[in-house]
Amino acid sequence: MRDLLDASPGEKLGLDAYRADFRRRDFAVDGYDSWKLERRQHFREPGDASWDAFVRRQWKEALELIEAKRPELVDLSRLATHHRCRLLRVRVVEQPLTPYLQWELHLLRLRAECGELIRVIGPEHIGAYEHEGPAPEVITLNDDTVYEILYDSEGELEGGVRHLDTGLRDRVAGRVEALYELGEDIDAFFERDVASLAPFDR
């Protein structure tokens, strides 16, 4: 993925600018799927009530707060359907699961229940694209936009690099789609590898 991004100039955006730009462009053009590749095994999400509960080791509360997101996620999927857009995500999962990833997989299962199309792949499926380091986190919007999502060393969101290039958007979407085709449906993965796990003692 890095080879694709490095071939097209992008504009680095700080956190506030990235969030504002994303909101402005999201669903701006009908009929184009949004593809997301999620690679890191740990993120920090301060301000997310469920993540905050998870960090406090309040697992039951964390799961209840994930479930509380259902109405907004259903609304998001309905909005995407209105704009003739599918929301597709490839989640790279390494074993053994990090505490963060165990928590996030509960959220991803809910996202799938609400309409997002999510598949899981192992690191072996993406190794061909990681000769120079881990693959970047990316998401496509509309017909011409790719964001490389940037995080600090602790995994906290710090902004993004915006690329406006229809050819790049198609190449990135095509590569993420190829990984998606190799993946396992989130529901099957969750039931086998996550559902029976005890909460991490963090």
Image: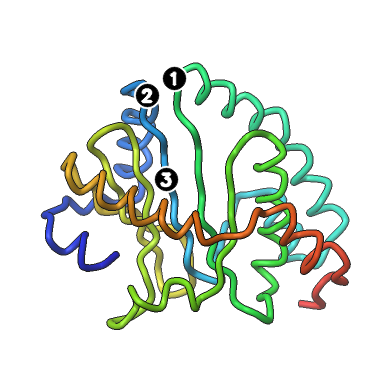
| Mark 3, secondary structure of its residue | strand
> Which residue is label 2 attached to?
31
Residue 56 spot, x, y in % from top left: 77, 65
Between marks 2 and 3, how big is the CA–CA gap? 13 Å
Where, quadrant-wise, is the C terminus in this rendering?
bottom right
Left or right, residue 188 beside residue 36? right
Residue 80 spot, x, y in % from top left: 50, 25
Where, quadrant-wise, is the N terminus in this rendering?
bottom left
Identify which residue is drawn at 73% across, 52% down.
187
Identify which residue is drawn at 66% across, 28% down.
74
Q: Do the residues labelled 1 and 3 touch (CB within 8 Å)?
A: no
Between marks 1 and 2, how big is the CA–CA gap? 6 Å
Asked if residue 68 is positioned above or below residue 152 in the image, the reply reads above
Foreground pick, 94 / 127: 127
Label number found at residue 35: 3
| Mark 1, secondary structure of its residue | loop
Left or right, residue 54 beside residue 6? right
| Mark 2, secondary structure of its residue | loop
> Which residue is label 1 attached to?
83
Residue kind at label 1, given as amino acid type: His
